[in-house]
Amino acid sequence: MLDQVADGVFVHVSEFIQSNAVVVQGASGVLLVDPGITRDEMAALGDDIRELGQAVVAGFSTHPDWDHVLWHSRFGDAPRYGTARCAASIADQLSTADWVDRMAEGLPPEYAADIPMELLGLLTALPAGATRVPWNGPDVRIIEHRAHAPGHAALLVEGRGVLVAGDMLSDILMPFLDADAAHPIDDYLAALAIFDAVAGEADVVVPGHGSVGGAEQLRHRIELDRAYVTALRDGGPFDDPRLGPAAPLEWLPDVHRWQVRRLGDRRR
């Protein structure tokens, strides 16, 4: 089911960690961003797009995590873009003969059998420093930054006021830092400053996981994420509703503790 969040912009929500696929209508078809998780879900999304009288003419993956680089034959063979660093990262992951087995180790067991791997990660790298998605539709600005994963990018659908945030600015997940980066905390804070700079252009924020929010929620989430990362840098304490007794995901506090330990080990 597609929910309209702005003129010509729709969101499909997966059962898996409230993953959001974004559909942007253009002149001759749609741009499909981070299109979903399971075979049946993506097939249904393809049917929903056809019911709009449209076909998929371009795809975009906000970053190279497995749940953002999936695809389904129902979407056709449109080019699927990612930033140069994103495409290089997933290509590296797919370069070994046992990549399916290695990637399967990280899949949620309750969904693993239903996740299509055959078209995973087949991205077209945009030129380094590219700032626009090349397609026949509203201008979609690429806001690349170092934060969650290599080549991570948000998209600003200009004229529609929609910020597609990738795996950032979630109301259900605290920041997941790229702990393999040289300066993960500084990188994340710098990315939040970039979001600050474009927040005035967005009326809607769509995180990779979680609820769609308005302009007020966008600014609130920037500040909430900044407080979390600052506490990571300074050694706590953490006062974050996503981690408290009413945490929306029961496993999230364990991931938080792992992240604190891993970043702490890097400082030693």
Image: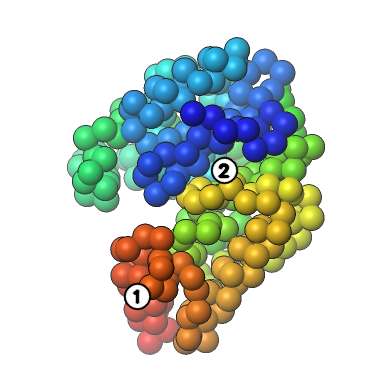
Q: What is the x, y in percent for residue 262?
A: 35, 75
For disc 2, the marked residue is 83
Camera sees residue 88: no
Q: Residues within 10 Å of mark 1 (few under 14, many from 20)?
A: few
Query: Between residues 203 and 105, which one lies in front from this camera angle?
Result: 203
Against 228, is 208 above or below? above
Q: Residues within 10 Å of mark 2 (few under 14, many from 20)?
A: many
What kind of residue is marked 2?
Answer: Thr
For disc 1, the marked residue is 257
Q: Are marks 1 and 2 in contact (CB under 8 Å)?
A: no
Q: Which structural element holds mark 2?
A: loop
Q: Quadrant of residue 187?
A: bottom right
Q: What is the x, y in percent for residue 98?
A: 21, 41
- First-in-chain label (1 vs 2): 2
Query: Which of the colour schemes (rainbow, by chain, secondary structure, one colour) is used?
Result: rainbow
Camera sees residue 207: yes
Q: What is the x, y in percent for residue 242?
A: 46, 67
Against 133, is 268 above or below? below
At x 37%, y 36%, the residue is 37
Q: What is the x, y in percent for residue 231?
A: 52, 81
Q: Quadrant of residue 25?
A: top right
Relative to 253, 109 lies left or right: left
- Total marks shown come to 2
Closer to the camera: disc 1 or disc 2? 1
